[in-house]
Structure formats: C-alpha cells, structure tokens
C-alpha cells in the first residue's frame, strides 16, 4: 500500500513548492520511487521538476468523450482508454508523474472518471509514496481519486483570509467524508511581526502540527532563474523546513511507511 500525501490550499500560497519539496526529500532519502499527481488545472508541477508538460488526463478524457480517438480493432473502449492514460504517465528514474489538467468542455466525466480512478488505484501499488498537488477546491479529492489520504498538508499564507481558506478545505473534506489520517499546516510567507496577532487564527484551523516558512529572497531568485525545485539547495529555508517536516511527519514517524 502506498502512503498518500495531498497538498492543498488557496491559489498562489506555495502548494506546488511544498509538494515538490516533499517529493525531493523522499527521493533524497532514497525512500522513492514517488508518483507525483498534478491535480491542479493550472498545472505547474511538471515545471517544478524541470520537465515539459506531458499530455494531460483532461485532454485524453476529452478526446475519449468526443470519440476523437480511433479504437483499434479487437480492443475494448476500456482497455484503449487505459492504454491512452498510460501515455500520460511520465517516467523518470526516481519519480513518475501524471498531470490531470483542466476539464475540457461541458461533457459528463462520470464514466471516464471511474476508469481514471481505477487507473490511479492500479498505479498506486507501484509506489511507496504518492504526492498529490491539489487545486484549492479539492475537486479531485471529491471525485475520490484519492480515497484515503495518509497526510493532508494544508498550505496557507500568513493572513486571516489565507488561514480561513484552509479551514474551509478541512470542512469540505469532512463534508465529503474523505478519510484523512494525519494533517499538518504549513504557514508560508510567515511574518514574525504578525505572529502574535495571527496566533488565534492558526489555532482556529485546528491542526496541531504547524510549520512555518518565511518569505525567502533566495526562493524568489531561484524561481526567477527557473531552477527546478529538485535542484534547489539547502541554503533555502523552504528546502530545509520541508525536509525536516517530511522526516518528522512521514519518513521517521512511526507508521510513516
Ligand atoms: N516562502 C516563499 N518565499 C518566496 N517565494 C515563495 C515562497 N513560497 C512560494 N514562493 C513563490 O511563490 C510563487 C507561487 O508558489 P507556488 O507555485 O508554489 O504556489 P501554488 O499554491 O502552487 O500556486 P497555484 O495555485 O498558482 O498553483 C512561486 O513563484 C514560488 O517560487
Ligand atoms: Mg501550483
């Protein structure tokens, strides 16, 4: 059974940075291989790994629904979609990833989504860790592609609105009856001068395990230079904090894997 980590939070708060740094730590500790799932319609996880964006699951689903794909003789629709979905899986040495992409068109995705769910659960057996970079609305989780989440890492910026947004993510997860075994909060762009003022808002999220990352000029620079997250150095606070967090909560935790 793989250990599933989902990273969720409002747009632009640092989800992809945190998700890819978690992947980096797992690989650096030689605990991989990892399956990274980019479940954000504005996918940028592939870029964080320094790869081109592969064909997305959304596009495959769309072509499937529009019957734009010619099914070879002797192949069922199901097995052909399975084959097509395999082409969306990008394989590298320690890391494979798949990009969900956006939903194309208004069609009903119920049937292909069932097939997608089966595809992801079949894949999951091959990896000790799955890391899902989620969109804010938890759409993919609500489609129950990830039925049990071992760890939900909520990412918020250090503001009242940011912290309320992650609280809503938790409420939504409860409503959708998603089973979450462990949850942590990452307060990104943490500002010491507001620490006291925002402490009640952090407590209100209701997550015991809280990690903070300050605004980091080195990260801004690395981003501008398009350094893939996988190659970012430990000089960066975000790299060190996410490494410590992954060690404590996942790799060195009892029952971590
Ligand atoms: N602590 C930080 N200090 C400086 N820059 C940061 C910090 N955290 C994230 N960033 C930068 O902020 C930008 C947004 O981060 P990221 O892409 O990880 O957010 P996201 O939540 O995935 O966004 P989206 O919702 O658009 O997918 C990136 O350019 C990233 O390098
Ligand atoms: Mg992102």
Image (cartoon, rainbow, N blue to C red):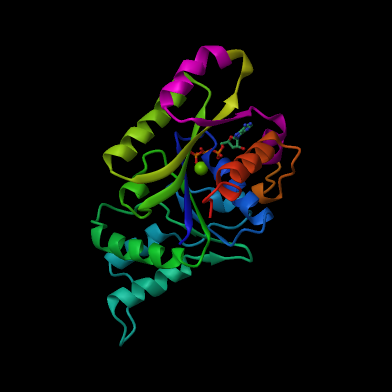
The stretch drawn in magenta includes residue 208: yes
Q: Which residues are magenta?
A: 195-224
Magenta highlight: main SS: helix
Residue 121 visible in the picture: yes
Q: Is residue 140 above or below residue 222?
A: below
Q: Nearer the viewer, residue 99 or 178?
A: 178
Is residue 42 something one can see in this rendering?
no
**For the point 54% across and 50% down, which residue is it?**
45
**Residue drawn at point x = 53 percent, y = 55 percent:** 257
Q: Camera-side residue: 97 or 57?
A: 97
Q: Is residue 139 left or right of residue 86?
A: left
Picture coordinates of residue 140, whole percent (x, y): 36, 49
Q: Which x, y percent locates residue 57?
A: 40, 60
Return the x and y of residue 159 as percentages of the image width and height.
50, 21
Closest to the observer: 139 or 54? 139
Position of residue 187 relative to residue 16, above or below, is: above
Q: Tell me which residue sits at (38%, 53%) in the image.
A: 146
In the orientation shown, which residue stands out farthest toward the front? Answer: 254
- Tell me the quadrant of the picture where the N terminus can be found: bottom left
Going 31% across and 65% down the picture, which residue do you hit? Answer: 115
- In the orientation shown, which residue stands out farthest toward the bottom? 74
């Amino acid at each position: 059974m793989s250990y599933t980590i989902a990273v969720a939070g409002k747009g632009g708060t640092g989800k992809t940075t945190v998700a890819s740094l978690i992947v980096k730590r797992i690989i650096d500790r030689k605990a991989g291989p990892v399956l990274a799932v980019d479940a954000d319609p504005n996918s940028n996880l592939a870029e964080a790994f320094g790869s081109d964006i592969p064909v997305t699951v959304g596009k495959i689903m769309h072509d499937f629904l529009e019957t734009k794909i010619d099914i070879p003789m002797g192949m069922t629709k199901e097995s052909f979609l399975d084959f097509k979905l395999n082409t969306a899986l990008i394989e590298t040495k320690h890391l494979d990833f798949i990009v969900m992409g956006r939903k194309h068109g208004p069609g009903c995705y119920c049937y292909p989504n069932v097939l997608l769910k089966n595809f992801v659960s079949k894949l999951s057996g091959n990896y000790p860790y799955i890391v899902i970079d989620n969109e804010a609305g938890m759409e993919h989780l609500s489609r129950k592609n990830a039925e049990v989440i071992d760890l939900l890492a909520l990412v918020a910026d250090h503001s009242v609105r940011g912290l309320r947004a992650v609280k809503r993510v938790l409420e939504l997860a409860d409503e959708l009856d998603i089973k979450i075994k462990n949850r942590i909060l990452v307060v990104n762009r943490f500002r010491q001068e507001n620490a006291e003022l925002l402490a009640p808002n952090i407590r209100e999220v209701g997550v015991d395990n809280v990690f903070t990352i300050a605004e980091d000029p080195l990260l801004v620079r690395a981003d501008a230079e398009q350094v893939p997250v996988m190659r970012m150095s430990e000089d960066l606070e975000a790299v060190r904090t996410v490494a410590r967090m992954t060690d404590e909560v996942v790799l060195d935790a009892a029952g971590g894997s």
